[in-house]
Image: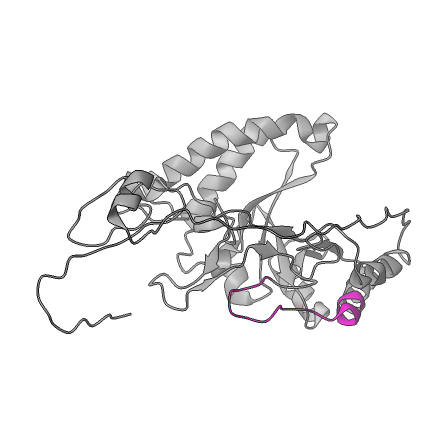
Amino acid sequence: FIAAEFEFGGFPSWLPTESKTISFRTSEPVYLKNVLTWFSELLPMLVPYLYNNGGPVIGLQVENEYGSNPACDKVYLQSLTEHFRAALGDDILLYTVDGPGKGMLSCGTLPELYNTVDFGGGNISSHFDMQARFNSGGPPVNTEFYPGWLSHWGSKFPSKSRTATAKKLDEMLAYGASVNMYMFHGGSNFGYTSGAKGNKDATNFVPHTTSYDYDAPLNEAGDTTLKYWDIRTVNSKYGPVYDVPKNSTKKSYGKVEMHYWGNILNDSFVSQCGTKTTNKQPLSMEENKQTNGVVVYSKDIEKAGTLTIGK
């Protein structure tokens, strides 16, 4: 329920139809009931993999950058934390992650959770000092160190210097910090699964591309990059490194022929593809109970005039 760079933020399309007053990522009853129902199914599946049970999982993140959410709902955070504890027991580390700012950490944390930070640059001492202010001890942790950034339609590919990335990683490891990279391996948002950024009132809407290469050390194809080898050199100063498989062989698939299928502006064609709905105001995809794909909106103009479209 917190994958903001996935279609509809990772939420199921039917969720907004549960209540007209639903408020995401808050203690609003309908939303919270659905979240806890989801975790009641998911969390028990993780129990065999916890470190205390012989598995590899040493910690679980309760929320993601919640301090950037204007709701700042501590009741919601407390409810999640209590639910995690009840399902997983007291021997697992529960933590959160937020940007290294006082306002973000104030809203995104609880005293009983270990609080980590995320950043891609800046003064690491300042960032980790801020993290320490919200913990009663424990190591400095950068839960999301950004070696690149995501791509948006219409924007240039957001490459990040491999030298700067390796240097900042070296600084953090020398500082004694634990570091997790986001992303270490690029990927793809297949089909209609890519998400978007924007404000609640739909202003500043910026959709993500199908590619989530991220200028990551391992690219979208899973190949090593020069940035990967720079990072590997840094890691070799602090621990063992291992042999790396060769990059995959690439092939050309040749000419791809496209065939005409139909015109989505043709009523008879559209009627064969989906369900027709009539309403006084345009309905969103979620209100149409459609998870993804395409919605075609049409209106018969009854008389001439001037159409003004607001924001």
The residue under the point 73% across, 30% down is: 55
- In the orientation shown, which residue stands out farthest toward the left? 303
Q: Name the one closer to the observer, 114 or 173.
A: 173
The residue under the point 15% across, 74% down is: 306
Spot occupied by residue 125 in the image (x, y as percentages of width and height): 72, 69
The answer to whether residue 155 is visible is yes
Question: Would you identify the image quadrant in which residue 94 lies?
Answer: top right
Magenta stretch: dominant SS?
Answer: loop
Question: Would you identify the image quadrant in which residue 273 lies?
Answer: top left
The residue under the point 65% across, 36% down is: 92
Magenta stretch encompasses residue 165:
yes
In the displayed structure image, the side of residue 257 where residue 13 appears, left or right: left
Q: Name the one closer to the observer, 200 or 270.
A: 270
- Judging from the image, the colouring scheme is one colour
In the rendered structure, which segment of residues is drawn in magenta? 150-166
In the displayed structure image, the side of residue 19 where residue 158 appears, left or right: right
Spot occupied by residue 276 in the image (x, y as percentages of width and height): 23, 42
Question: Would you identify the image quadrant in which residue 269 lies?
Answer: top left
Spot occupied by residue 122 in the image (x, y as percentages of width and height): 68, 72
Spot occupied by residue 81 in the image (x, y as percentages of width and height): 51, 40
Magenta stretch encompasses residue 176:
no
The answer to whether residue 274 is visible is no
Q: Name the one closer to the observer, 243 or 255.
A: 255
Query: In the picture shown, does residue 187 fall above or below 84?
Result: below
The residue under the point 30% across, 39% down is: 272
Total numbered labels: 0
Quadrant containing the C terminus is: bottom left
Query: In the picture shown, does residue 214 fall above or below 53?
Result: below
In the displayed structure image, the side of residue 1 where residue 97 appears, left or right: right
